[in-house]
Image (cartoon, grey):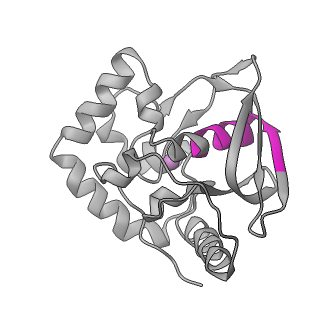
Amino acid sequence: MAVLPVRIVGDPILRSTTSKVTTFDKHLAKLVEDMFETMDDVGGVGLAATQVGVDLQIFTFDTDGIRGAICNPVLEVGEEIQNERQEGCLSVPGLGFHLPRSNWTKVTGQDVHGNPIEYEGEGLTARCLQHEYDHLQGMLYIDRLQGDDKKTAFRAIRNRNYNSVTGETQAQRSARLGTSFAPAASSSAFGNISPGKGN
Ligand code: NI
């Protein structure tokens, strides 16, 4: 097992659509093991393959007691919207914003052996499944923000300070507790990056 480097916004692979998994072999199993280890190491609740530089439709997650990996996921969402929780991303460190998402989600796909598998959940789990699914379409949560939040997010990413925060975040990651969605991870350590927003 190995902890893999997490790609940061600006890396083109985060903006790429991904290829379907067609070979369910030991290499795939090793990749998924490494993704779990990486996700745990950085304190994330979810990780998509593109975030570790791999062009495949796979993500791992660990939320509300549900831990899983899914290949070639198809997403289904409910109509009810959740709004209360702040969202963040390991590939967009130092930022967090409230983002409306469907409160219920189901993903249907395959496990590492190619067998049919599905996961469903509400609240944080639903948010995470939607977030990771988006990654596999080359989409980041900040793309879904609107108005001032979107301006603030993209301004922060363009801001030169962001580079130093990114470096600092990378350095601290292994030692830092929290989750990619946890307000504490973005607002306490790096609250100055998104003044008045999302904390
Ligand atoms: Ni993410």
Residue at x-position 58% and y-position 54% = 179
Residue at x-position 82% and y-position 41% = 120
Residue 148 in view, yes or no: yes
The residue lying furthest to the front in this view is 22
Relative image position of residue 90 (x, y in whole percent): 46, 53
Q: Could you tell me how many numbered marks the image carries? A: 0
Span shown in magenta: 118-132
Residue 94, above or below 196? below
Q: Specify the quadrant of the image occupied by residue 117.
A: bottom right
Residue 74, above or below 111? above
Relative image position of residue 4 (x, y in whole percent): 47, 74
Residue at x-position 51% and y-position 77% = 3
- 13 within the magenta span: no
Image side of residue 138 versus residue 171, left or right: right
Residue at x-position 77% and y-position 62% = 111
Residue 94 in view, yes or no: no
- 128 within the magenta span: yes
| Quadrant holding the N terminus | bottom right
Q: Specify the quadrant of the image occupied by residue 7.
A: bottom left
Image side of residue 126 versus residue 94, left or right: right
